[in-house]
Image (cartoon, rainbow, N blue to C red):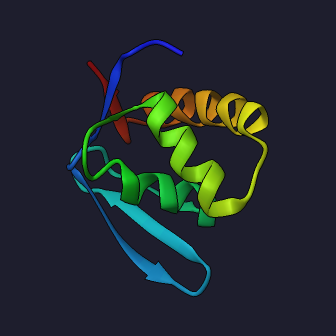
Amino acid sequence: MDETVWHRNDEWIGANIEDALVMISVERGNYLSLNATAAAAWEILETPTTAKALSEQLSARFAVAPDHCAKSVAAMLDRFEKLGLAIAR
C-alpha cells in the first residue's frame, strides 16, 4: 500500500440508527447507510490516516486476517472516494 493519506469529507454528517450509521450530505443531496465496518472506518478517518494504518486498526478491531483486510480496505476507500466520503491526498 502506498503512503497516500486519507481524509474524511466533513460535508457529510451522520447519526447512529440501530446497527448502522446513516449519513447525509446536504451539499450533494445524497444519503447513505454505513454498516459496522464502514462506520468504524469513518470513525478512524476522523484523524487523517493511510490505508495501511486504517487496515491495521480494522484488522485488530474485527479480528480479520491482515491480507484480507487490506484488500477490503482498498475497495472500501475506493468506494468512499467515489461517493465523496473520503479524499486522498
Q: Is residue 73 left or right of residue 32?
A: right
Q: Which residue corresponds to the image point at 33% horizontal and 51% vertical from the top-left? A: 29
Q: Which residue corresponds to the image point at 38% horizontal and 60% vertical from the top-left? A: 43
Which residue lies most toward the bottom here?
A: 18
Compared to residue 6, the image places residue 65 above or below, namely: below
Q: Which residue corresponds to the image point at 26% horizontal and 18% vertical from the top-left? A: 89
- Indicate the position of residue 23 as horizontal and vertical percent values: 40, 62
Give the total of numbered labels: 0
Q: Quadrant of residue 14?
A: bottom left
- Indicate the position of residue 53 as horizontal and vertical percent values: 45, 37
Q: Does residue 35 appear anywhere in the picture? A: no
Q: Which residue corresponds to the image point at 46% horizontal and 12% vertical from the top-left? A: 2
- Indicate the position of residue 46 as horizontal and vertical percent values: 27, 53
What is the quadrant of the N terminus in the image? top right
- Indicate the position of residue 15 as horizontal and vertical percent values: 38, 77
Q: Is residue 78 left or right of residue 16?
A: right
